[in-house]
Image: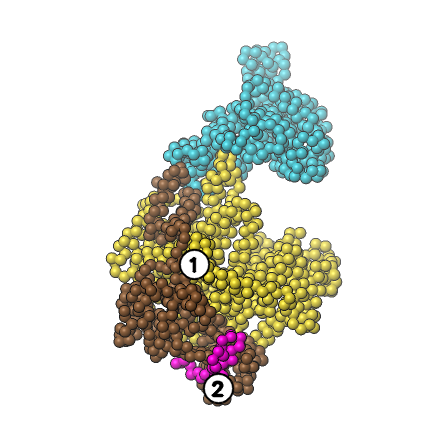
Chain colours: A brown, B yellow, C cyan
Amino acid sequence: MPRLPLPPPSRRRRNLAVALRPNQQNDPKQPTRTRSSDRRAGAVRRRGVQLLAGAAVLGLVVGLSGCGKADPYYSGGSKTVTITVPAWAGAEANVAVAKHLLEKKLGYRVKATQMDEPVAFDALNSGQADAIMEDWLGVPNKEKKYVEEKKTVVNAGHMGVTGHIGWFVPKYYAEKHPEVLDWRNLNKFAKDFRTPESGDKGQLLEGSPSFSTHDAAIIKNLDLNFKTVYAGSEAAQIKEMRKKYEDREPFLTYWWTPQWLNSELDLVEVKLPKRTPGCDADPEKVDCAYPYTKLTKFMNARFAKNGGDAAEFLKKFKWSTAQQTEVVEWMTIDQMDTDEAAAKWVEENEETWKKWMP
Amino acid sequence: MSAPALEKRGTPAQPRAGATAGGPGGGPGRPRGPLAALGSRPRLLALGVAVLVAVVTAAVLDGGTWPTALVYDIQTRLDQVSDWLTDNRDRHWIFLYVLLHVSNFATGTVDQLYLVLSDIGWIGVTALATLLSWYVAGAGLTRRSLRVAALTVFTFAVCGLLSLWDYALATLSLMLLAVTVSAVIGLLLGLLSGLSNTCERVLRPVFDSMQVMPAFAYLLPLVLLFGIGAPAALVATVIYAAPPMARLTSLGLRGADPAALEASVSLGSGRVQRLLTARLPLARKEMLLGLNQTIMMALSMVVLASMIGAGGLGDKVYQGLSKDSFGIAFIAGTAIVLIAIWLDRVTSAAGEQLDAPARTTGSGFARACARLRGWPAWSGFLALALLAYLTGPLFGQRFWPPEWTVRISAPISSGVEWLTGKIGSDVPVLGGTDTWANNFTLWVLNPMRDGLQETPWWAALLVVAALALVGGSWRAGLTGVLSLSVIGAMGLWEKSMDTLSQVLVALVFTLVLGVLIGILGARFDRLMRVIRPVLDVMQTMPQFVYLVPVVALAGVGRPAAICAAVVYALPAVVRITAQGLAQVDTAALEASRSLGATGIQQLRQVQLPLARRSLLLAVNQGVVLVLAIVVIGGLVGGGALGYDVVYGLQKSDLGVGLSAGVAILCLGLLLDRLTQSAGTRQTGSGRN
Amino acid sequence: MSETTQANPVFSVRKLWKVFGPKAAKVPGDQAYAGLSAAELRARTGCTAAVRDVSFDVHPGEVFVVMGLSGSGKSTLVRCLTRLIEPTAGSLVMDGEDVLAMDSGRLRELRRHRASMVFQNFGLLPHRSVLDNVAYGLEIQGMGKAERREVAARMVDKVGLEGLGERRPGQLSGGQQQRVGLARALAVDPEVMLFDEPFSALDPLIRRDMQEEVIRLHHEEGRTMVFITHDLNEALRLGDRILLMRDGEVVQLGTPEEIVANPADDYVRDFVRDVPREQVISVRRAMRPAADGEAGTGTALAPGALVSEAIEAVARTGEPARVLDGEKLLGVVGHEQLLAVVAGNGGGAGTSPAEEAAEAAVEDAAEDDSAGADRDGDSASGASESDSGAGDKDSADHGDSDNGKAVAGV
């Protein structure tokens, strides 16, 4: 039959049922197919069917997911591990290596999902993600709430790298003006760091809003003639730093180690006042340097308990700053594909990862 | 800034007044001074006074910010809401019985789709998609259907070649679900607003807000409600992508040929019968266009979706950013653009197919195809998909073979880096874009921002009300004043003024450039043909991709944000301008040519006046699009509201993020209503 | 004559009103508004009376033409017949059943089975093939697919579209599209067909074809038809009886011959001025009593024969022709009578040549006054304020008796 106008209602319903049954089980494309087909004489009927089909699919799948109470800790299948990836390259390297080993050696499926630190904690809490591989302890309130109070998230140990945040200037500038490396002299050089964005104050370049920073408080409490200017993203910050570095211009920036860019740009840290106990307890009153942080892994509590080999493996995962930096440099400076870099590292460092295997 | 705008608006009316009065110069308003002209128009006078007051008070009084007494601390409230949501996520019934079902459904379905697609294998997926596109585009040996099929193969092959197969599948799975849900919801809302006038009145502002509100701002609440990953991404996409479907469905239903509908009534059809057999089918063209728009909007959410962990090609764009590799971001962006173009061509081919005659003649093959249309074809596809699903694993690799890939990201990165380095600072004499950007910030942006911030809040309200009044609409004035008041009450006055200054500057740039290019494009066909694909890419390429080069050119700061906004909003303005000029009545144009008008004269005296409606639409669209990019500006140092929204999302801070989002929405409503009211006034007076 | 005695008119319309505007319901009964012209009524009440106090019967098997210029309310009137437009007041009976009292289900039944309509703009569904368009009415009735397609195929053949069943409306010419509309209306096998200016969008040659098609269909099936047109020639050609409307009111109701030969007022007279009268008027109207000696000679004509036929006969024989009703001699027509008809002086019952000349002079004088020229009339160039006032009064005073007179005259 070349054309099929509206059949009587009873038959229409039967057709629909036939079309739908395979659909809910395993054919993903059916809804789109139905939709994109409206161009012929039978469009009328199909339009109606689409409506019904859409509603039915929704209804049925919701139905299948269990009427009544929903599982608040739903996440994929049992052999799927979801790891969060924050927006910096070092963390990406951790995940890439872990993913490679989990998939190739342990037979898991790994979902590596882009997520910032605070969101990642929420995801661990709800079970939508299983593990954070590198946390800079930047959200103490969430950590306290989930780890200590709700006990839905557990600390899974250090991942081997120690991180440090600070204020940095390029080496060429520090060599010319060595005094700049002490915070007490910063005001003297403020005019060198002026930009149109910072006005008549010196500019302290900040990165992404997701980074943990007390810089505004530090500036205020140390009475510095500086202003924080947010690049808005790590990418923008790096681009700006590279540009200034190439032109040998002075700049002062919020920065951290380990960072892959450090092997390309020579940066020197400006000394901030020594840390005293509790000097950064109140975010408004911080007036001291950032700590050295042992970067930590976190896991969803249920995953830590029932995660089997994957959980065991992730708990044991631990490598050195040098090893991480090596992978990151492959990824960034050599522009190697992330998965490829991970594969290469795994191939060359069997000794290290053998110890992580459950 | 309002004074020149006002003059521009005033002038076109005056020659008309003179002309109708008959004698040259004899009409009212021609030879008199500006003050007298103001006097004859009380509304203009009111605006003049308001602007004067604003300027004077801004200069005299210091600090014009909204008084703290009138600020309501919304942020703490929102933070409490946020805390409550995280605390009750696994306890409260609304989660257990409603929201979690939605999020489990989304996660489960997207996961399943992804698994099925990867089980079918790369050969199967490519083959099925090609077959399907070919079928939808007419299923024959016509040029159209073959071209669409070729495009499909090309798209998938590029995804594979650039080692993006896996990411592309993840994006496709999410998009399949998101587009389906958006289309269904859009259709239902469209039915409501198409069939009931009350619903239309209620829904229209809702649709407006859904589209003006930056998606960034509602990502966080959605994450809190539905959880990270697919669910929040799905809901965000639906919010953003459903309105066009709804609008166009409603438009189609309302515009259905009344003669056909009457014929249907006269044959005794009932309401439902008429809807199903006549009204909906008559609207199917608009609905298909709506689906096309919905797909495009949904695809523009891909990168945002990956910010909250939905994965896919957006992840790749992000990785590119974190490694400062334009190449990686660019090839991922290219894949997104290609998928967008592919889906666009498929849906428009399907649209053209609506008009195509049923094939009764032609080759045997075409006849065979024609015979297969309908359910036989669909069940055939289903069977094929099932077969591919079952046998797919037998054919070796599920993903594109790694040997068949090419590496082009590194050369692209270095090429662009070299280029931006050159333009950025090494241009002889002129100094390069970086220097320009610095001067621009110093001499234009800073004074403007300071000026707006110094203007007392009540004077700003006065100016807005007067502007709307000149536009002739009380309602626009009320909306504008209310919007500004909401901003003030949230305590975001200073930041909003900062953002407003950026938006206005970006708007001016966009309009000047866009109208100019549009005029040239309308004049020289060949130019238009060259720039059209460029415009397409500019519009579909995720903005994140060009952030890095933009920073390289303009440095971190507001000029970079403005650049990004101009790049994003330009295509629409160019297109609308060119279209408006091209659609000008050819008879009028011919008449002016026959009178010996030069090209410039034709443009100035005939084309531009007659295309005024389109130009105003271009302004309006420019406003909406520039605002949409304010948040992206926050990622390259634009600061102000955009930064707050990004901060809110990345720090999970509902108070900061949502209130800044609402402030952007308010700015959007304000500017949208002001430009719209100007539009209606112009067309209104044109009729007299 | 014969119609009045026939029982059960298909449609019986009495004092039907359709008023658009606020408080529309108050207009029909109110005597205060009765004598007002359309413009005055609009000024006084803000309402537009599209149909004003219209009464008529449509008899089984006849082609009933409603004719008027645009804005005369004829299209509204025909839509009132199946309540596509809800009448404001009056009564409407179809086959003895009160249409206005029908509930929506019953009304749908009426539309589905008893009256179907052909539209000026065709109203076809562009996404369906010709066949499915024709079958649309049957589909709405709930008929099975195979069956309705079979019926539709027959209809498609019947209206002369053989072999085009699979085309889309967009691929057809205007004439062909209207044939589809015709077939769609025929397919439901209605008791009465309503035509709303079906051919006015077509060009003249095709219009003539289509008119012949309608005549043919009417001959074959004898279906009752109500036909709306603004084209006098079409009305005269198709109509058994013609209802002439102006500003929503009935101006005259009668056979084509009556209207041409005996216009009710100046408006109608003006309308029919250019009609080739010999083609419309029968010899019965033109004949004079037979003089002595004429009873035996001359060509014999039936009383219904057209004057044009008589002219031919008289010209051929050179002597007056006889008008015979069976064996009975009714009268004779000679060249004087025939010329009088052609010249526009004869055949009229009421007007003498002298009167008509005087009226023509008045009309000429009023010609410049364009107040009444909202009609796009080629045949109504002489419309004037005084004219319309007279016309209004005329029909308001004795609209009903007009009907009676017209009917009785046949």
From the image, tell me which residue sits under label 2. A181
Q: Nearer the viewer, residue B90 or B220?
A: B90
Residue depth check, mark 2 versus mark 1: number of the one nearer the observer: 1
Judged from the image, the secondary structure of the residue bearing numbered disc 1 is loop
Judge whether residue B268 can be spotted in this image.
yes
Q: Amino acid at mark 2?
A: Leu
* Quarter holding residue A7: top left
Question: Do discs 2 and 1 share a chain?
Answer: no
The number of callouts visible is: 2
Residue A270 is a magenta residue: yes
Q: Gap in Å between the C-alphas at discs 2 and 1?
A: 50 Å
B150 sits to left or right of C120:
left
Residue at 36% in and 70% down:
A156
Q: Nearer the viewer, residue B221 or B143?
A: B221
Please provide percent x and percent y for residue C137.
Answer: 46, 34
Please provide percent x and percent y for residue C189.
Answer: 46, 29
Residue B536 is a magenta residue: no
Please provide percent x and percent y for residue A347.
Answer: 27, 73
Judged from the image, the secondary structure of the residue bearing numbered disc 2 is helix
A349 sits to left or right of B177:
left
Image height of B661 relative to B387, above or below: below
Residue at 47% in and 87% down:
A174
Residue at 68% in and 39% down:
C46
Residue furthest out toward the front: A149
From the image, tell me which residue sits under label 1. B90
Q: Amino acid at mark 1?
A: Asp
A219 sits to left or right of B307:
right
Q: Nearer the viewer, residue C1 or B625?
A: B625
Image height of B381 relative to B166, above or below: above
Please provide percent x and percent y for residue C196.
Answer: 54, 34
* Chain of the residue on which disc 2 is drawn: A
Q: Which residues are magenta?
A: A261-289
